[in-house]
Image: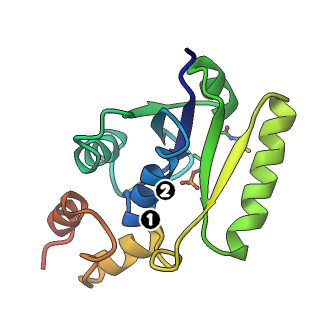
Amino acid sequence: MKRNIAIYPGSFDPATNGHLTIIHRALRIFDTVIVAVANNARKTALFTLEERQALLAEALQGEPRVEVDAFEGLLVDYVRRRQASAVIRGLRAVSDFEYEFQMANMNRKLDPDFEAVFMMTGEEHFYISSQVVREVAALRGDVSDLVPACVQKKLIEKFPK
Ligand code: PNS
């Protein structure tokens, strides 16, 4: 029987508890979730591509139906190559909607078979973003409730007290 594969793409700079919740929820719908870290030369990241992948792999260890990978270039090409049926994206607030709507439609223009599934972020995570986590951590604020333990440890290494 054909496995139902979803791709969860993103920058994951770094992964947050919001991302992890979306992944676990997606596993209830899909057989396999490929977490695909974007190698985007335009964005300057706090963590290297390898660090971002390693942190996700550590946070998701023990979950055999999750694969952590990286991709470069167009998302639609990667989705086709991996024979995935859909892309997962989390939606936090109305402010996310416009960007996601534009991206989903652009992707469908590039590939009419492209499909995106949007998952509403729960109330406990709607204010969390990688950007906010980076900023609070850089100012030595406590992000222990917002990220997995391995990410918190790495943030403390990047921003020692
Ligand atoms: O976590 P992010 O930064 O919101 O993720 C954005 C991402 C990586 C999903 C998006 O930038 C993307 O798909 N990049 C790949 C390049 C691409 O296909 N661009 C056209 C999409 S409109």
Q: Amino acid at mark 2?
A: Ile
- Which quarter of the rendering shows the C terminus? bottom left
How crowded pointer 1 is (Cα within 10 Å; few <14, some 14-19, many 20+) is rated as many
Q: Residue at image x 33%, y 52%? A: 47
Q: Which mark is residue 147?
A: none
Q: Which residue is mark 2?
A: 22
Q: Secondary structure at mark 2?
A: helix
Look at the numbered disc 1 and give the secondary structure of its residue: helix
Q: Position of residue 85 (x, y in %)?
A: 65, 30
Distance between the Cα atoms at labels 1 and 2? 6 Å
The three-letter amino acid code for the residue at tag 1 is Gly
Q: Is residue 82 above or below residue 38?
A: above
With 45 as the anchor, is 100 left or right in this view?
Answer: right
Query: Which residue does the image show at 37% across and 41% down from the upper left?
Result: 49
The N terminus - image quarter: top right
> Residue 18, labelled with which disc?
1
Can the viewer see residue 44? no
Marks 1/2 in contact by CB < 8 Å: the verdict is yes
Does residue 127 appear in this view? yes
Residue 75, x across and y down, in percent: 64, 34
**Neighbour class for label 2 at 10 Å: few (<14), some, many (≥20)?**
many
Left or right side of 15 for 90: right
Choose top left, top right, bottom left or bottom right for residue 111.
top right
Spot occupied by residue 14 in the image (x, y as percentages of width and height) = 37, 58
Which residue corresponds to the image point at 39% horizontal and 76% vertical from the top-left? 135
